[in-house]
Image (cartoon, helix red, strand yellow):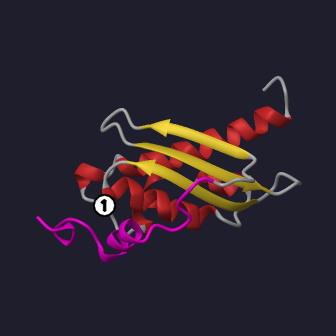
């Protein structure tokens, strides 16, 4: 069964040509999540500006199916340049839409990106604001 039978051209493109894939040497925030449904995992690396307002860059390492890799790729594009609060407000639906939709059996894959963003930003805040 071909990828194109289940996935949009946008998702296939993100899977075959992932954007911002790889670790980031100068990241100042990192989030790691595992999807309990399928076992896919995502490690998200962020570079947050010195004032703590904006995500300057984002990269990822994802192990999983095409939908997980594609939504991870799309997530890095969506959050780059966003204020932290705007990035945290993005939902799994935003990431699914960014890849042209997901089959219902793969909607859980878009949860990885949403969770990883929150985990990374929470970790960044905790490093700077002890006691949180």
Name the image quarter holding the C terminus: top right
Residue 73 belongs to magenta span: no
Can you identify the residue that label 1 sits on?
102
| Identity of the residue drawn at 75% across and 53% down | 26
The number of callouts visible is: 1
Chain part drawn in magenta: 1-23
Residue 121's place in the image compared with 23, above or below, is: above
Res. 100 in view: no
What kind of element bears circle 1?
A: loop
Res. 101 in view: yes
Residue 130's place in the image compared with 102, above or below, is: above
| Number of other residues with Cα within 10 Å of mark 1, as a class: few under 14, some 14 to 19, many 20 or more | many
Residue furthest to the front in view is: 25
Residue furthest to the bottom in view is: 9
In screen coordinates, is 1 left or right of 117? left
Residue 15's place in the image compared with 39, above or below, is: below
Measured from the top left, where is residue 82 in percent x and y? 70, 63
Instruction: State the image quarter where residue 129 is shown.
Output: top right
| Identity of the residue drawn at 52% across and 48% down | 114
Front residue (pair 57, 100): 57
């Amino acid at each position: 069964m071909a990828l194109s039978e289940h996935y949009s051209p946008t998702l296939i493109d993100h899977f075959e040509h992932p954007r911002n894939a790889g670790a980031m040497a100068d990241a100042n925030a990192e989030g790691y999540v595992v999807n309990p449904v399928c076992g896919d995992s995502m490690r998200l690396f962020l570079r947050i500006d010195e004032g703590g307002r904006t995500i300057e860059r984002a990269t990822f390492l994802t192990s999983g199916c095409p939908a997980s890799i594609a939504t991870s790729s799309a997530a890095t594009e969506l959050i780059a340049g966003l204020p932290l609060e705007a990035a945290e407000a993005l939902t799994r639906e935003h990431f699914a839409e960014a890849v042209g939709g997901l089959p219902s059996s793969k909607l859980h894959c878009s949860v990885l990106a949403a969770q990883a963003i929150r985990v990374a930003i929470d970790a960044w805040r905790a490093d700077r604001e002890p006691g949180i």
